[in-house]
Image (cartoon, grey):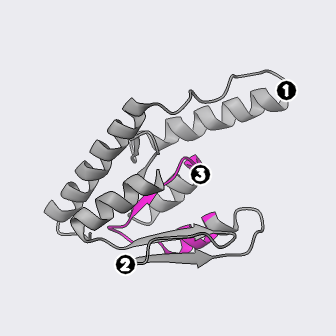
Amino acid sequence: MKLEIYKVARRYGLGVTLVAGSWMRIPTDVDFTLTIVDQGFDAADDWIAGNVAAGDIVITADIPLAARCLERGAYALGPTGRPFTELNIGDALATRNLLSEMRGAGIESGGPAPFQARDRSNFLQALDRAICALRREGNRP
């Protein structure tokens, strides 16, 4: 997924900030930065939620993080291209919590479907739409 994000960022001339608990290799040819945070529980999520701004696009599969980003006016997008919005985040959180409770009770829910080529295509299209929409609204990027 990172390679796709890099490609889109280069095309639009956008900066990218990756947040992780340890060092990783990132491209050096454009405005890409790596922020290394403590490895504590939710440290990366807390940093992202505390530093995200309106007009930012956050790519995450973490639904509670997506909700926190939406509260700050950011755009949240899942890795399969699913945009998280004020209209669907409540249902997404409720479903996540229900599945978590089921797992806690020992009920297998199967987990997410494997990532497929169409997911990559959907993601790229959704990211492109998000960038274009933010630009039309006069927000970054």
- At horizontal 31% and vertical 51% (from top left) the residue drawn is 127
The magenta-colored residue range is: 45-64
> As drawn, is 55 to the left or to the right of 68?
left
Q: Nearer the viewer, residue 22 or 51?
A: 22
**Identity of the amino acid at label 1?**
Ala
Q: Which residue is mark 1?
A: 105
In the rendered image, residue 1 lying in the magenta stretch gets the answer: no
How dense is the environment of label 1, judged by Cα within 10 Å: few (below 14), some, or many (20 and up)?
few
- At horizontal 67% and vertical 75% (from top left) the residue drawn is 37
**Identity of the amino acid at label 3?**
Pro
Q: Quadrant of residue 29?
A: bottom left
Image: 4 above or below 134: above
Q: Which residue is mark 2?
A: 31
Image: 116 above or below 134: above
How dense is the environment of label 2, judged by Cα within 10 Å: few (below 14), some, or many (20 and up)?
some
Q: Give residue 22's position: percent from left, percent from top.
A: 69, 71
In the rendered structure, which disc, 2 or 1, sits on the residue that comes first in sequence? 2
**Identity of the amino acid at label 2?**
Asp
Q: Give residue 77's position: percent from left, percent from top.
A: 42, 49
Q: Which residue is mark 3?
A: 64
Contact between marks 2 and 3 (CB within 8 A): the answer is no
Q: Quadrant of residue 117?
A: top left
For mark 3, give the secondary structure: helix
